Image: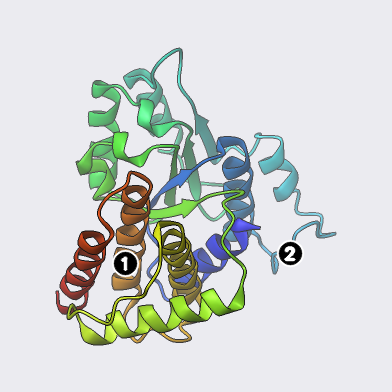
Amino acid sequence: MVVNRFLDYVNKQLENKRLAHVFLLETNNMELCYKEVCEVIKSLNCPHKYIKDCNEECNLCYLVDSESLPSMVKIQADGAFIKKNQVLELKEKLSFKPIYSRYNTYILLEADKLNVQAANTILKFLEEPEDNILGFLITTNKENIITTIKSRCQTFSLMYGDVVDSDESMREVAKSYLEKVVAKKGLMVNRLDLDREEVLTLFKNMLSLVKEDVIKNNFLKIDDFKKIKIMDLIENLLQKIKYNVNLDMLLDSFYIEVGRIING
C-alpha cells in the first residue's frame, strides 16, 4: 500500500527530529488517502509499538477509526468551500493540550476548497506552528492551493492505482539514468532512444525510485530535501509529457533543474 512509504517517511522524520508541522498530500483518491492518514495518526500517537490490528487495550485505534478521538479534528467543505468559521473552530479545538494522544492533529479534506478568508486564517495558523500540533491538508489538485500555504507544508504524493512499469530492465535503466543526471549536476547526459510512452514510463520509475530512496537512502548521495525537490520536478514533468511537450526540451529542462537543485 502507498501508506507504507508515507508512514516510513514520517517515522524516519520523527526519529531524526525533523517531523514537519503540516503535510500537503496530493492524491487521486480522497477516501483512501484519508484512511492512510488515519493509520499515520495511529502510529504517531501509539503508546506501544504500533502494528496494524494490534491487541492492545489502549483504545486509540478505535477512537481514530470512529472519529471520536478528541485531539483529532477533520474539516471538509461546507457546501462549495471550507469557510473561515470552520478554521476558527479548528483553532479553538486545538488550543487544548491532547489528553489521549501525543499530538493534536487536524485533517483538511479538499484543502483546495479553502475560500480566501479561510486560507488567510489557516495561513496565520501555519506561520506560528506549535510542537504538539500536526496537520494534514489533502487535495486532488495542489496547484489550487495558494503558494504561501504550500511553502509552509511538506508535500507528498499519495497516488493509488497509478501503475508503474514493473519490468526490471526499465527500472534499472531509470536508476542508472537518474544516477548519471544527479552525478553530472546539470550537465547533459547521453539521451536515451525512447518514444513518448517510454519516456513517461522512465519518469514514473524515477519518481518511484526517488520516493523509495527518501526512506532507504540506498543510492542517491544527496540530502532528503533535495530528493523531495527532485520528486516535485519529476511530477511536474510527468504532466508535461502527457500534453505533448517536445521531449528534447523536456529532457533539457530536467538536466538543468536537477543541476539547480543539486548545486543550490
Relative to 40, does residue 108 appear above or below in the rendering? above
Relative to 158, does residue 121 appear above or below in the rendering? above
Residue 78 appears at what percent x and percent y? Answer: 46, 16
Q: Which class describes the residues within 10 Å of circle 2: few (<14), some (14-19), or many (20+)?
A: few
Q: Which class describes the residues within 10 Å of circle 1: few (<14), some (14-19), or many (20+)?
A: many
**Which quarter of the rendering shows the N terminus?**
bottom right
Estimate the spatial distance between the alpha carbons at disc 1 and disc 2, rounded to whole Å.
31 Å
Identity of the residue drawn at 76% across and 48% down: 59
Q: Nearer the viewer, residue 254 or 222?
A: 254
Residue 230 appears at what percent x and percent y? Answer: 31, 67
Q: Which residue is mark 1?
A: 230
> What mark, if any, has residue 51 been given in the picture?
2
- Amino acid type of the residue tagged 2 in the rendering: Ile
Which of pointers 1 and 2 lies earlier in the amino acid sequence?
A: 2
Element assignment for label 1 = helix
Q: Residue furthest top?
A: 79
Which colour style is shown?
A: rainbow
Label 1–label 2 contact, CB within 8 A: no
In the shown orientation, is residue 53 left or right of residue 98?
A: right
In the shown orientation, is residue 249 left or right of residue 203?
A: left
Residue 235 appears at what percent x and percent y? Answer: 37, 55
Residue 193 appears at what percent x and percent y? Answer: 37, 73
Q: Viewer-nearest of labels 1 and 2?
A: 1
Whether residue 185 is visible: yes
Identity of the residue drawn at 50% across and 52% down: 103
Whether residue 15 is visible: no
